[in-house]
Amino acid sequence: MASMRDIKRRKNSVTSTQQITKAMKLVSTVKLQKARTRAEKTNPYTDQMYKTVSSMMRKSGNIIHPYLTAGESERKAVIVITSNRGLAGGYNSNVVKLITNGDFKKEDLDIYALGSKGHDALARRGYNIKENRSDIMDDPTYDDAMKLCRTVLDSFAKGEVGEIYLAYTHFKNTVTHIPTLIKLLPVDTTGMEEAEVDDNVMMNFEPNTEEALDMIIPKYVTSLFYGALVESVASENGARMQAMDSATSNADEIISDLTLKFNRARQGAITQELTEIIAGANAIN
Amino acid sequence: MAEIFKVEIITPDRIFYEGEAEFLEFTTTAGDIGVYAKHIPMTTVLAPGAVIIHKDDDEVVAAVHSGFAEILGDKVTLLAEIAEWPDEIDVSRAEAAKARAEEHIANKTMETDIKRAEFALRRALTRIDVASK
């Protein structure tokens, strides 16, 4: 049996770890609330954007536009949103798995990494990292989203990549976060047809449909991307909150187990001492 | 009294404005337009400029840079990437941006992205214009 001193030392160390996990949980709870409010504030913008674009798609019929057809290049750009910090359970590895277990060929991918955890994991596996913008994740703004989108859209326009994907974590609610992979370009029109139809309105586009598409699709892509950014930040903090919560309760379990062991060891020591004293007294008589 | 319609200005970070108007003015890539109720349905691309919302002889002014507008008979939705109230505008910063853009345009070289400089200039002018109203 371990000595009393060893058990005590172990118990102290678990207790101080528990204090850290408890504090981290509190911090991420506060951050989660902030991030969630922010994610909710972007919703009206992305919803309206989706509605407008899907109604444009329905009404413009089968027009041919570069943004609506895949480029000829085999290469695919993937924007990967993870976090800069760990200790968030499976949050980062789930996003990375989307790419490593997906139908992608490793050689065909250009990775735009946001978040050093995802960047490191993919770089280690030998993926081609085109750009690492992990600094954005510290405080994502719409401006950052716009700039990165412009870079990615440029490479699409130049024909360097044929398709653009986005891997992020969808924030469904505080406890459910779903790693998601969506196609940004060419615009995925499936599902748009079924969206609420109010086709009685004959929409006009100015200057004309094609030019309007030219202007609006980059904004649509940016809004999807920005929405994914803020949702990922919320998911990250949600995941960390959960991970730290279970770490804290695991620490509780270990502490109670160690307390039991410590008490048993102490009792054992006392019993042994008594036995020795009694045996000694008997020997003198 | 003119008929009223709903106006919504939405930016990525917030619902910037939600209310009613009798008459709405804003700038599109094809020039300034004014909208009354029962306008024909139209989607148009915004250019940097002032948005003026008229209601009950009152005027509300805001600066809007890039985005698009969806006009329906009884509702106008402006999706703007950037929108600012006059009191949120930092005039000295806008003046500096204006000077910088003008300088870029004046000393243009092969590398100068003239479209971008012009866009920056228009944004700065809009800000100064709206802030002074």
Image: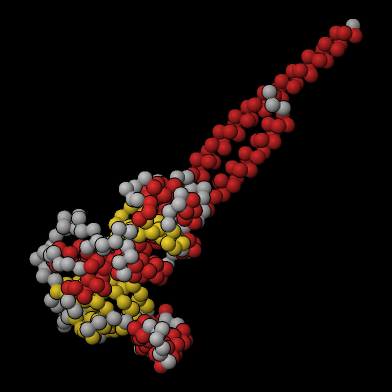
Measured as percent of width and height from the top left, residue B4 is found at 18, 77
Residue reaching furthest to the left:
A200
Can you see residue B93?
Answer: yes
Up-down: is A93 above or below A141? Answer: above
Quarter residue A114 falls in? bottom left
Quarter residue A111 falls in? bottom left
Q: Name the residue located 11 percent from the left edge and 68 percent from the top edge.
A: A201
Q: Name the residue located 16 percent from the left edge and 57 percent from the top edge.
A: A193
Measured as percent of width and height from the top left, residue A226 is found at 36, 63
Measured as percent of width and height from the top left, residue A69 is found at 22, 63
Up-down: is A246 above or below A270? Answer: below
Residue reaching furthest to the bottom:
B106
Measured as percent of width and height from the top left, residue A35 is found at 43, 58
- Where's the C terminus of chain A, which quadrant? top right
Up-down: is B116 above or below A176? Answer: below
Residue reaching furthest to the right:
A284
Question: Foreground residue, A82 or A285?
Answer: A82
A269 sits left or right of A90 in the view:
right
Q: Name the residue located 21 percent from the left edge and 75 percent from the top edge.
A: A211
- Where's the N terminus of chain A, which quadrant? top right
